[in-house]
Structure formats: C-alpha cells, structure tokens
Amino acid sequence: MGKVSDLYRQRVAEGRIRPDTAQQSVLPHLDRVLDDMAAAPVPEKRSAWRAFLGVGSPPPAPAARGLYLWGGVGRGKSMLMDLMAEAATVPVRRVHFHEFMQEIQAGLNRARQRGEQDTVRPVALEVAATVRLLCFDEMQITDIADAMIVGRLFQVLLEQGVVIVTTSNRVPEDLYKHGLNRQLFLPFIALIRQRLEVVCLDSAVDHRQGRATGGPVWFCPADASAKAAMDAIWDDLTGGAAGEARRIEVGGRSFTLPQFADGVGRSGFWDLCGKPLGPADYLALSREVSVLMIDGIPRLSASNYNEAKRFVTLIDALYEAKVRLIASGADQPEQLYNEGEGSFEFERTASRLREMQDAGWGRDAG
C-alpha cells in the first residue's frame, strides 16, 4: 500500500495544495487504514452470485477498521479522499455518497422486479464483488428511503470484507437529524461508531471562504487566460481535488453537473443553459452547491434567446440561495445583453451579477 501522507507531501512540494495543520493531523488515520488493509488477509474472491448462494467460505470480517472523517465544508475532506483512493493498491472505488445511493436504489428496483425477498443483500454483494475499499465523499442522509436501507447495506458490505472510508459535514449523531422515523436509523449510527474510526478534521480555515473573495470572481473575455484563472481558483477552493460529475435528481428525472468537489460545482454555460432546464432544476442545483463556477458565458441576444432566459432563471436561483458565483464571460455583466428582446429585463440580472461579485456575497458555507 502507498501512503496518503507521502502523496500529500508531494502535492505540497509541487505547489498544488497549501499545507494545512489540521489536514496533516488526520493523515496518520488515513495511512492507518491502508496499513491495516495491507496486513490483513485478502478475502476469498467470490462472485456476487456465489456469495448470495453461500458457495465457498465466507470472507473474514475486515481487520482494517474504516474511517469516518467529518468537519465543516471547505476543509479539504474531498481532496484527502482523492489522495486516499490514489494511494490504495487494492480494488477501490471513490464515489460521492449521493450518487452511490442513487445506484443502490436503482439496483433495489431491479431486485424487486426479480421478486427478491431481501432486496438489499444481492445489491450489496454486487458491490462487494468488485471492491475492497469503498471511499464515500459527503455522506449526508436526507431521504427516508436512503435512511431505511443504508444500515442494512453497510452491514452486508462490512460482512463481505469491504473497508469503508467516508467524509461528512456532520458528526455521526447528527446524520438524518429530525428525520421521519429516525429511531429506526439509530442502529446505523451505532454501526458507524463500532466499525469506523470517527475523526474530526478540525480546521479553522475554510478553503473556500476568503479565497474566492480575495480576488476577481468574474473574468472576461472568456479566453485561455480566463480559463487558467478559473482552473487555479478551482484547485484553490477544492484543495486540488479532481472533482466528479454530479447527477442531480429533480422530480423523477435528472441532469448532470459536470464537475463537483466538496460543495464546489463547475460547468460550462451550455451545460446548464443550453439544455431544457427550468426553475426546479436550478433550485435543486442551488441546494447542492455553495460555490458555482461557470465557464464561457457568451454574448446574449435574439439568436440565443432561450439560453439567455435560462441564464436569467439560473442567476435568480443562485442569487436567492446566496450561492457564491465565479464565472468567465464574453464581457462584463452590463455588456453581455445589449440589444434585442429581453435586453431590458437583463438589466436586473446584470445588477445581481455585479452584486454577487462583492467580497461579502454568499451564504455561510458552514
């Protein structure tokens, strides 16, 4: 196994991340998981079907205790999770918890259609057949359907020898707080405490707050220089995380935010405004991110009227939700939409875009 601490020091030496005392304090815990996995016997490889039928000896409980890393937003948890997945030499999957649970729900639906009595077990076995280390980013339970299955899901995964590492903005006891039938969820919290080491990333530094407000957040024209500036801000806000596509569910359908890490989203203009999205989609997006980066906002006119209308709707949603906006555009906000139908109404949007550039703009990311 590699070491997360070695990769961290390498990134610091390369100037890709800034050294952070709190981050450095949790590196031994991440290394410990990989070291324990390296020392543990490798579970017998069985297909999900063989495991379901009980063919072959059951894998031993993992000698490696997992890890639950929690702390405020913008502290670098996603970046550390990236390093964890990179350092591992066993079959590993690094996935956002929300996306993973959507996959599980789809698997449960297939199991129900097959007439399975225990729908969770075969789905969990499919996962366990392909990975030994499962890295979840941003565990957050807000849906009663997820709350009712996650305990059983984790139980089967752990029984199958899967080691789980997860990040969260909340201490375990605050998961699904005030949720419906929460008493049924409490055994899962006990399972976390029993099988995962709970560690707090207790940093006073929010790597999002202050950085975006410490310099320009609107770049024009949207050329190579602007892209380089946006790339640098992305690296700064996410601690160098690669990010991943984030699927956002809205009323039984979904759309994709191309890049997401630790509460920061990034997208091209056409990904958000060139598709038939509406107010509900943009409101859902506003709940998912605390910072949104938009690349390549074009000049707006009658030729792209529908896209311009969607952009206005998007900005209204971001504005009301106090989402921090960082963007590159063809010109300054007041010059984006100077003529044609909709240009007069755009004055309010331009004013909001200008206001959203103020240093104090944005909701409390905590």
Image (spheres, rainbow, N blue to C red):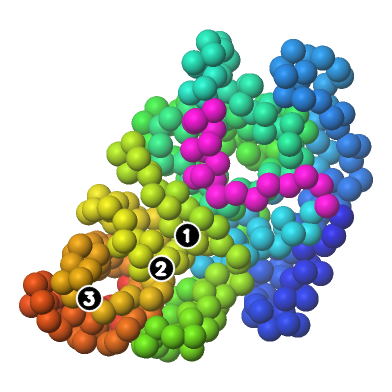
Badge 3 or badge 2: first in the primary sequence: 2
Task: Assign the N terminus to one quadrant of the image.
Answer: bottom right
Q: Which residues are magenta?
A: 89-107
Query: Relative to residue 175, is residue 332 depicted above or below?
Result: below
Q: Nearer the viewer, residue 222 or 60?
A: 222
Q: Is residue 181 left or right of residue 134?
A: left
Q: Which three-letter amino acid code belongs to the residue tagged 3?
A: Leu
Q: Earlier in the sequence, mark 3 or mark 1?
A: 1
The C terminus lies in quadrant? bottom left
Percent x, y of residue 351: 18, 81
Q: Residue 346 in the image: x percent, y percent?
A: 14, 75
Helix, strand or loop at disc 1?
Answer: strand
Does residue 96 belong to the magenta stretch?
Answer: yes
| Picture quadrant of residue 282 | bottom left
| Contact? badges 2 and 1 (CB < 8 Å) | yes
Residue at left offset 49%, top offset 31%: 105
- The amino acid at mark 1 is Pro
Q: CA distance from mark 2 to mark 1?
A: 8 Å
- Residue that numbered label 2 is attached to: 268
For image coordinates 37% across by 88% down, the residue present is 221
Is residue 352 something one can see in this rendering? Answer: no
- Dot 3 crowding, Cα within 10 Å, few <14, some 14–19, many 20+: many
Q: Nearer the viewer, mark 3 or mark 2?
A: 3
Q: Amino acid at mark 2?
A: Gly
**Is the residue 106 above or below the residue 164 in the image?**
above
Res. 300 mark: 3
128 on left or right of 258: right
The mark tally for this picture is 3
Residue 258 is marked as 1
Q: CA distance from mark 3 to mark 2?
A: 15 Å
